[in-house]
Amino acid sequence: MHSVSTTALESSIDHFFALGPEAIGNPEALAAFHELRTALELGHLRSASPDPISPTGWAVNAWVKRGILLGFRLGALEEMNGTHALGHSALSFVDKATYPIRRFLPEHGVRIVPGGSSVRSGAHLARGVVMMPPAYVNAGAFIDEGTMIDSHALVGSCAQIGKRVHLSAAAQIGGVLEPVNASPVIIEDDALIGGNTGVYEGTIVRSRAVLAAGVVLTRGTPVYDLPNGTVYKATAESPLIIPSGAVVVAGSRAIQTEPGKGLGLSVYTPIIVKYRDDKTDLSTTLEDLLR
Ligand SMILES: CC(C)(COP(=O)(O)OP(=O)(O)OC[C@H]1O[C@@H](n2cnc3c(N)ncnc32)[C@H](O)[C@@H]1OP(=O)(O)O)[C@@H](O)C(=O)NCCC(=O)NCCS
């Protein structure tokens, strides 16, 4: 975290955020937002950052989230036709003027394979990120070096994705913009997020964890850890946290109370069947040659 005078920017953002609708049309408010947006895109500021002192290992930068919200307030709707962005004038979109789609150049070191993907401004994609179409990255998201975002994947607003993460086809990483002090979804380095998975509501997936295809995690989802004989859940103070190296598969568990029990019903339950081993590494080896 560097190169931005964060204290000055923070007080400016907080000032204009507190003004409410009065900030609309104020050029200084817009300038402060633009400074924040640029810092986010460069990765100099993040909506949440690693913090060894915090119990979760992460600190939420609530003022940065307020700044992102300020941008939505300040932006009027405008037509964004495809002429500049996509080279195709038949396409037409309408969005907040403060959040146009990002443009990339080869020197950014990011690959965005053609075919219907968008990165909204205010998102950071580090060098070596590859995006297969179609995929969407929302404002405030931070995606670190070497991460693969496969087709139909979503990276929601403010989500923090580590280095060399594989977001498989149709992986949905939820956005958490409000409340501003709520932790966004965080996926740490070297995690493998399988196909058709969903990670929502501020869940933290620790480094090297593997979510098998079809796993869905929310604040309300208990996760059974078989090797350690324990169950992980979100609490009022802490999000759901998947431990480092856990291999989580989509399972089910029998309902123990009536009438569900008598009806023989079961509910979906993510289960940690083991912790990552050589076999997992083999199953999750990525296609380096494609990069
Ligand atoms: C989790 C995964 C990586 C397998 O890891 P692994 O370490 O090789 O797992 P193993 O084969 O050793 O299996 C361990 C146990 O979990 C079970 N298991 C493995 N994958 C499972 C799955 N997806 N669903 C349910 N159970 C599963 C196995 O049956 C085994 O149980 P057992 O010990 O009772 O026999 C793999 O199943 C997976 O989901 N890969 C991601 C695929 C994907 O989404 N690709 C995206 C491409 S875009």
Image (cartoon, rainbow, N blue to C red):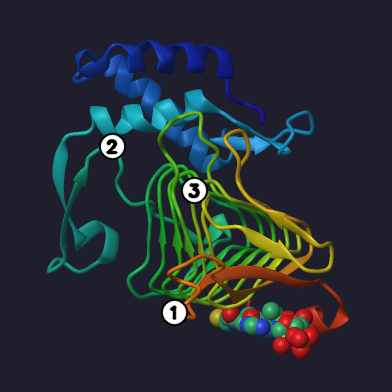
Q: Amino acid at mark 3?
A: Glu
Whether 286 is drawn above or below 276: the answer is below
Quadrant of the drawing holding the N terminus: top right
Q: CA distance from mark 2 to mark 1?
A: 53 Å
Q: Amino acid at mark 1?
A: Leu
- Asked if one can make out residue 287 in the rendered structure from this viewpoint, the answer is no
Q: Circle 1 is placed at which residue position?
A: 263
In the image, ligand 1 is in what quadrant? bottom right
The residue tagged with tag 3: helix, strand or loop? loop
The residue tagged with tag 1: helix, strand or loop? loop
Q: CA distance from mark 3 to mark 2?
A: 25 Å
Residue mark closest to the camera, 3 vs 2: 3
Q: Circle 2 is placed at which residue position?
A: 98
- Asked if one can make out residue 55 in the rendered structure from this viewpoint, the answer is yes
Whether 77 is drawn above or below 118: the answer is above
Q: Circle 3 is placed at which residue position?
A: 201
* Left or right for 155, reference 245: left
Badge 2 residue CB within 8 Å of ligand 1: no
